[in-house]
Image (spheres, rainbow, N blue to C red):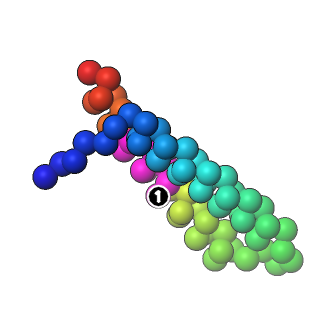
Amino acid sequence: MIIASSVPTLLGEIIRQSQDIASEARWIEYYAHLNPADVECIEDCVRCIVDDCKVILENINDLKGEEI
């Protein structure tokens, strides 16, 4: 069963995911400044960003469906 989300809900999720991406980017910057860089933590942050981007793309596709 598919439950449709409202436009404001979808936009709110996009904003929340964008904020998560910004936070992960700040952590990447922090880990990259360490000597030596904490590569595993950087990789983990990048994976989180990729996951957030996938959710944003899903929400965008749902928004396109709402506009039709």
Q: Position of residue 59 (x, y in %)?
A: 39, 42
- Write down the quadrant of residue 9 in the picture: top left
Which residue is at 43% across, 36% downward?
A: 8
Asked whether 18 falls inside the magenta stretch, the response is: no
The amino acid at mark 1 is Asp
Q: Residue furthest left?
A: 1
Q: Pointer 1: what residue?
A: 51
Q: Nearer the viewer, residue 2 or 48?
A: 2
Q: Quadrant of residue 34?
A: bottom right
Q: Is residue 57 visible?
A: no
In-image side of 54 versus 40 (left or right): left
| Quadrant of the image occupied by residue 39 | bottom right
Above or below, comparing residue 13 to residue 29 in the picture: above
Q: Position of residue 11 (x, y in %)?
A: 47, 38
Q: Is residue 33 left or right of residue 43?
A: right
**Mark 1 neighbour density, 10 Å: few (under 14) some (14–19) many (20 or more):** some
Q: Is residue 11 left or right of residue 28?
A: left
Magenta-colored stretch includes residue 55: yes
Q: Relative to residue 27, is residue 9 depicted above or below? A: above
Check the image and report above or below for 56 versus 30. above
Nearer to us in this view, 20 or 7 = 7
Residue occupying the point 59% across, 61% down: 46
Residues drawn in magenta: 51-59
Main SS, magenta region, reads helix
In the rendered image, residue 15, in percent from the top left (x then y), is placed at 55, 44
- Label 1, secondary structure: give it: helix
Q: Residue at x 67, y 58 (%)?
A: 23
Is residue 23 something one can see in this rendering? yes
Q: Compared with residue 57, is residue 25 higher up or lower down, i.e. above or below?
A: below
Q: Position of residue 50 (x, y in %)?
A: 51, 56
Q: Is residue 38 left or right of residue 57?
A: right
